[in-house]
Amino acid sequence: MEVPRTQAVVLAAGEGTRIRPLSGSVPKPMLPVADRPLAAHAADAAVRAGASELVFVVGYEADVVREYFGSEYAGVPVEYAVQEEQAGTADAVRAAREYLDGSFVVLNGDNLYDPDGVEELFDAGPAVGAYRVSDPTNYGVLSTQTETATVTNIVEKPADPPTDLANTGAYHFPAEASEWLDVGESERGEYEITDVLARVVDEYDVTAVELDRWLDVGRPWELLEANEWKLGELERDVRGSVHETADLRGPVVVEEGAAIDAGVVVEGPALIRSGASVGPNAYVRGATLLGEGAKVGHSAEVKNSVFMRDATVGHLSYVGDSLLGREVNFGAGTNVANLRHDDQSVQFTVKGERVSTGRRKFGVVVGDGTKTGINSSLNAGVKLSPGSRVAPGEVVLRDR
């Protein structure tokens, strides 16, 4: 008996304007979450669930996606479809239509999904991923029959939500849905995949597959949360060079080619990638990712942060709850504030508007190639655009 063929379409075309400045030269789905890009977690879940082929929909900085996934990923063939402009999720899947020849699963490349839930989604098609949220007014909300979990309706951001089941943007569509992608424009001028889902709901029994865990990574602090999730799954694995006086506590991964110097303390979960170096006498704690080639200098402290490739923090510095882009260089004595004096949630600018991060502790978000001078201070919630410069001794209270 022939095994049914199910392809996985991974949406990875967007820049991610809400996550700027981290997406200055890297599409949001390719930002690092633990040991791989964000989109690779969705791809891995699809492969584990039995995807016969991966189709990545690319656009912004498409070559970054192509270079990472190649023509085959984890033993599964890969194709690429180009979305010429960001015109909505149905438009993105429509770009991949020429590759579709059976039932297909759609996953957002900038979301983290519970892998067991993705496997159930593959098995249960037609289906849609659902997740229970405390405030459904910010999501598409699914109504279901209680006994069968069959979807009866979906409504976008309702003022009076009928349920607490949020649509996670994960779908298993029947083959003919590929012909239903030519939907009309929505009120916000985009072509929405939820309109396709609505038609599938009208013509099929669609199962709401409830996920145990899900995260939509749209803003910088959500990328921090994504790393907290995946770093929290680490198991201790030390292959790099570790000085005999260093103290590694708990789930710490030191990849081959990384170096931990004398007197360093690392409290896991932490991932020190190949080519990275720490210390001497540095302190790394919380859920921290030090990307390839990253450096933490003498007696510096790093807490619950993400350092992307070749980011450097000089000696006698403190960096907490922050995200540093590629080739950032913090001069010696640079200190990051991550707590407001009034103890309220730290705010951050997203698309020109100050919004709450919902986090009591949150530091700075720093674009690629930024440099700070010695003894500089950065306030909680500050955003530094790619290539920014901070003078020695300067106190930065506003975005730059």
Image (cartoon, helix red, strand yellow):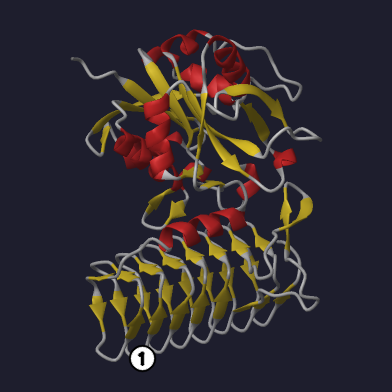
Residue 15 location (% of width, % of height): 56, 39
Picture residue at 67% right of the left edge, 40% below the top: 164
Q: Nearer the viewer, residue 68 or 77?
A: 77
Residue 273 location (% of width, % of height): 33, 65
- Look at the numbered disc 1 and give the secondary structure of its residue: loop
Residue 252 location (% of width, % of height): 34, 72
Left or right: where does residue 36 sit relative to residue 227?
left
Picture residue at 59% right of the left edge, 77% below the top: 373
- Can residue 111 be seen? yes
Residue 104 location (% of width, % of height): 41, 21
In this view, 194 is above or below 320: above
Which residue bears the numbered disc 1?
263
Q: Quadrant of the N terminus?
A: top left
In this view, 349 is above or below 301: above
Left or right: where does residue 250 sit relative to residue 312?
left
Picture residue at 31% right of the left edge, 36% below the top: 47
In this view, 125 is above or below 22: above
Q: Quadrant of the C terminus?
A: bottom right
Q: Write down the quadrant of residue 342 in the picture.
A: bottom right
Q: Write down the quadrant of residue 270 in the picture.
A: bottom left
Query: Residue furthest toward the left?
Result: 1
Q: Nearer the viewer, residue 272 or 343?
A: 343
